[in-house]
Amino acid sequence: MKSLIKIAWRSLWRNKRRTLITSASVFLAVFLALFMRSMQIGSYEMMTDMAVREAGHLQIHKNGYWEKKSINYFMDYSNEIKREVESNPNISIAIPRMDNFALASYGDLTKGVAIQGIIPDMTDDRINLSKRIVKGRYLKENDTGVVLAEGLANYLKIDVNDTLVLLGQGYQGISAAAIYPVVGIVKFPIPKLNNLMMYMHLDQAQETFAPYNPDLISALVIELKDVDDLSEEANILNERIGFNYEVLSWEQMLQEVVQQIESDNAGGIVMLGILYLIVAFGIFSTVLMMTVERRREFAIMVAVGLNRSKLAIITLFETILIAIIGVIAGVIFSVPVLQYFHHNPIPLTGDLADMMLEFNYEPIMPFSLESFIFVSQGLTVLLIAMGIAIYPMIYAYWFKLLKAMRK
Amino acid sequence: MGSIKISNLHKVYNESKVPVKAVNGIDLEIKQGEFTAIVGPSGSGKTTLLNMVGGLDSPTMGDIEIDNVHIGSLNSKELITYRLNNIGFVFQSYNLIPVLTALENVAFIMELQGIPKDERNKTAKELLEKVGIADKINDRPGELSGGQQQRVAVARALASKPKFILADEPTANLDSKSTSDLLDLMQQMNDEYDTTFIFSTHDQRVMEKARRIITIDDGLVSSDILKN
Ligand SMILES: Nc1ncnc2c1ncn2[C@@H]1O[C@H](COP(=O)(O)OP(=O)(O)O)[C@@H](O)[C@H]1O
Ligand SMILES: [Mg+2]
């Protein structure tokens, strides 16, 4: 076996230039593929992370809430649910919240706002609102004030320490009205959120919108420890708490994120396919030439007693070695480059950037260093090489000895 | 050991189109230890005959029996093993594996036979000394002259301890000095190892070195002379 590898290895270097060019093309393809995949996987990881921070892995709602998004589909955060959630070993955290709409007035200015009643600490751990405070302070426990988005505050010409009037519809048709001091102003990079959002303590939201239902929430945001199969986990939980409730995964709630990842990933795979197709042709033409120009050599070897299967193994080694040289060089070169970009990500613009801003993320292109990226690209190239090696191997098994000897 | 019995051997090429009767009914017996030349003009059927004896080609008709083995009864895989263990080949040119050194070329045959590394390297060195290129054992074929390459080929042919060595026009590409050197070497090896040598040639000087000269014309033995 050692001799077969030796023959294969040395045969490759008989035409140094050709082998180097072929391996270099593999190298380049592997590098490009790794670069592209690292970037894509990195951005998917980040998008998933953003989505989970925003929506949790799962949310429990009253059945129908996600479709209607109406206050009439709010649910009681009952002791039963609390117990169920606390006793579930796979749930690491459960955060109640209330999302609602109302009118906010200051002086003679009025505007529709999106209100989030939150538990300040728990929510801040996830979406880091306190970092976005540009004036005043963030909400605290038992806070009776509200935090406004900057664009909204500007529209209403309201400032920290001013008092805002809130008017809206409460649970089961009651009318809701309250006044709140503004304690802080947050700034969002994208206008949609910046002109709309208002945050208050969940207790305050409950008092205002559901004074007779003190445990009312719109959603219970759940984060899991083990996220192998989200929809399975959702089903199990749903069965336990009953079908008055719906348990949705972030993938169900934020389908546009899932679709964006899927379509981007599909595009990436098509690109990889084209890239590897080109490389495959390069390897194939080299292997083809190596076979054709050594017909007599192969014939002599078989004539003097080399098994055709061993000859086939030599050609397999040759093909795979060309690929391995390229793969190893590609990986060795890629790791530091990707590491650099992992720690110094490229700033982003465009659609993706907007989406990231929406989720309160910095618009950067993150690079993933997940080992499966390297393994899968390496294996892909090796598989391609093995596929190509079928040609010289078939030749080794079937060529006509005498015809080849006469060459 | 090493006697070859050829009976009523025929080879017809191109049977479907214009048939060429390359070998046309040859009967021969070659005994252990012979140093025999197959001679005849170009196209007379020497290569065809040697290829069939060497198990590289199959007869259209007739039988080749080597020490009670009928070559025709072996399948192609068995033939490869048979060739490896029983027949040494020296071809006209480009005999050697170009990426292996002289030593590796000779040792490779023994490796295929499963001989342990130390032993095969020792034997290969001895053989290369015998054929007179002890100082070139680490050169690759490309670095050797034509005559030197043929010497390595002879050493390789001997390495597997074959029953006989077939050499199809081994001197065709050599100058006259190298030709006579190679023939002397083959003769010496024939004496020393008692290995049967069968070589083809159409070179007058080469055939003169043989102890038996079998002349072939149009696929038939036209004369068979044993010298002493
Ligand atoms: N593969 C083949 N197909 C058809 N004809 C062949 C083939 N090989 C040899 N011949 C013919 O068989 C005859 C004998 O050839 P060959 O054995 O090579 O003779 P020699 O070695 O004595 O020159 C020639 O007429 C040659 O043209
Ligand atoms: Mg010939």
Image (spheres, coloured by chain):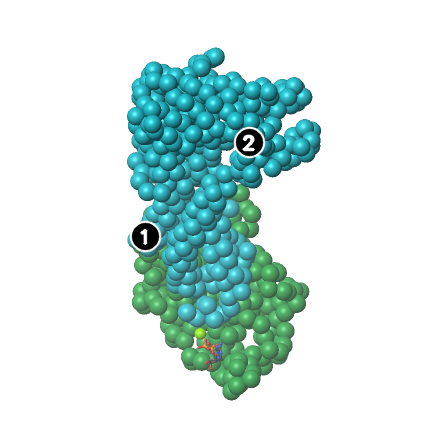
**Chain letter of the residue carrying label 1:** A
The kind of residue tagged 2 is Ile
The kind of residue tagged 1 is Ile
Mark 2 Cα shell of 10 Å, populated few (<14), some (14-19), many (≥20): many
The residue that appears at 36% across and 27% down in the rendered structure is A149
Q: Earlier in the sequence, mark 1 or mark 2?
A: 1
Badge 1 and badge 2 in a common chain: yes
Callout 2: helix, strand or loop?
Answer: helix
The residue that appears at 44% across and 38% down in the rendered structure is A44
Q: Which chain is cyan?
A: A
Using the rendered view, name the quadrant where residue A179 is placed: top left
Nearer to me, B199 or A203:
A203
Nearer to me, A33 or B52:
A33
Q: Position of residue B152 (x, y in %)?
A: 40, 56
Classify mark 1 as within 8 Å of ligand 1 or not, answering yes or no.
Answer: no
Nearer to me, B194 or B85:
B85
**Extreme-front residue of the structure:** A108
Q: Which residue is mark 2?
A: A71
In the rendering, what colour is chain B? green
